[in-house]
Image: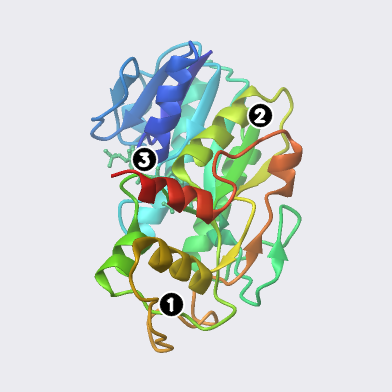
């Protein structure tokens, strides 16, 4: 297959390397492509600039949209999560391309639920905030677009080089949130693996959640890391930003049942295996 990865960063590069290793042709697009795995062909273009997308490789079989906003403002979000997919779909259509699949990577951040309830693909995703609505509009642009689309909503991505909680537990700055503060996570390799899995499915559903098997209390994750690092468990701090689930981005439990039922098998089913592998690597 000939596959374009638009927004070829942390997850995209892992995916691109796997696709090339499996014998596919892969292109990695970003504004400043660098560090692409061997065999992945670079395309330097700004997805927010329609004029920059006129020279895409021909006869693409599949597109993966995995760009992430470089900043927290509405302008950053609109450029990457809404204008970007629209521009790319329009450029592909204008060039007469007919990819048989567009996998659009989105976020479980579209679920505003904060009561610890389980959410899945059938749960309402009606974010009250503007950023969440931009993400939803980008998803819709793909699902209502000219090519068969599938949205994958990823949870918090961690992995090599993305070790936020390990670093904070190690340096003593982590604080224990109150009970009911849930975290949903996915290891980078499973995020890339899930996208590759969806690309290989003959008839994927329009929407999947990309999370591991076990939503966890953040406090349990921190305790696990402290025990493995041989440092004291983080002290409680109810006033820490984000520690109160009512103020957090959402204290929900995300189910991966649909992805699992479709045949996907994660390498790291829970944070224990995922963080365990990172801590085992010197
Ligand atoms: N990180 C998380 O925990 C998390 C959670 C849920 C969902 N997600 C989603 O998962 C996907 C992958 O995330 P990631 O962590 O792999 O992202 P990342 O490492 O930040 O990579 C994003 C890529 O997008 C490119 N990019 C940004 N703006 C662009 C533009 N205007 N035109 C072209 N390329 C652009 C960046 O390269 P340049 O800067 O060189 O352009 C970079 O290569 C994203 O869709 C993200 O929203 C992430």
Q: Which residue is mark 1?
A: 242
CB at disc 1 and ligand 1 closer than 8 Å:
no
Residue at the (48%, 36%) spot, across then down: 65
Q: Which residue is mark 3?
A: 10
Task: Using a 10 Å C-alpha cutoff, classify the residue at mark 1 as few (fewer than 14 neighbours), some (14 to 19) or many (20 or more).
Answer: some
Q: CA distance from mark 2 to mark 1?
A: 37 Å
Who's the residue at 58% across and 20% down the image? 99
Q: Is residue 255 left or right of residue 173?
A: right
Disc 3 secondary structure class: helix
Residue 26 against residue 235 in the figure, above or below: above
Pointer 3 residue Cβ closer than 8 Å to ligand 1: yes
Query: In the drawing, what numbered circle is on residue 148?
Result: 2
Disc nearer the start of the sequence (2/1): 2
Where on the picture, by quarter, is residue 231? bottom left
Query: Which image quadrant shows ligand 1?
Result: top left
Please name whichever residue, 140 or 252, is drawn nearer the observer in this view of the structure.
252
Q: Is residue 249 visible?
A: no
Q: How many circles with numbers are drawn on the protein? A: 3
**Which residue is located at x 40 percent, y 55 percent?**
77
Q: Could you tell me how far apart the alpha carbons at marks 2 and 3 are, in whole angstroms?
A: 25 Å
Mark in front: 2 vs 3? 3
Residue 61 falls in image quadrant: top right
CB contact under 8 Å: marks 3 and 1: no
Mark 2 burial class by Cα count in 10 Å: few <14, some 14-19, many 20+:
some
In the image, residue 29 above or below residue 134: above
Which of disc 1 and disc 3 is earlier in sequence?
A: 3
Classed neighbour count for the residue bearing mark 3: other residues with Cα under 10 Å, few (<14), some (14–19), many (≥20): many
Horizontal side of residue 106 vs 67, given as left or right: right
């Amino acid at each position: 297959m000939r596959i374009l990865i638009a927004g070829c960063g942390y997850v995209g590069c892992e995916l691109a390397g796997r696709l090339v290793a499996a014998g596919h042709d892969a292109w990695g697009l970003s504004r400043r492509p660098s560090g692409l795995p061997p065999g992945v062909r670079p395309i330097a273009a700004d997805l927010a600039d329609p004029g920059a997308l006129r020279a895409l490789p021909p006869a693409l079989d599949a597109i993966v949209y995995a760009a992430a906003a470089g900043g927290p403002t509405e302008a950053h979000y609109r450029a990457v999560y809404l204008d970007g997919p629209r521009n790319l779909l329009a450029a592909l259509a204008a060039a007469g391309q007919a990819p048989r699949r567009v996998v659009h990577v989105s976020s479980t951040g579209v679920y505003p639920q904060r009561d610890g309830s389980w959410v899945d693909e059938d749960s309402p995703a009606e974010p009250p905030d503007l950023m969440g609505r931009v993400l939803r509009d980008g998803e819709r642009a793909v699902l209502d677009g000219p090519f068969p689309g599938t949205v994958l909503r990823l949870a918090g991505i961690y992995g090599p080089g993305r070790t936020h909680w390990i670093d904070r537990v190690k340096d003593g700055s982590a604080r224990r949130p109150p009970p009911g503060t849930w975290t949903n996570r996915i290891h980078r390799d499973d995020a890339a693996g899930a996208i590759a899995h969806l690309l290989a499915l003959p008839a994927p559903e329009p929407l999947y959640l990309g999370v591991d098997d076990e939503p966890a209390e953040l406090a349990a994750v921190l305790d696990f890391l402290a025990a493995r690092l041989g440092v004291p468990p983080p002290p409680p701090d109810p006033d820490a930003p984000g520690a109160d689930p009512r103020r957090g981005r959402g204290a929900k439990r995300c189910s991966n049942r649909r992805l699992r039922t479709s045949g996907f098998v994660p390498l790291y089913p829970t944070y224990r295996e995922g963080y365990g592998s990172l801590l085992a690597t010197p």
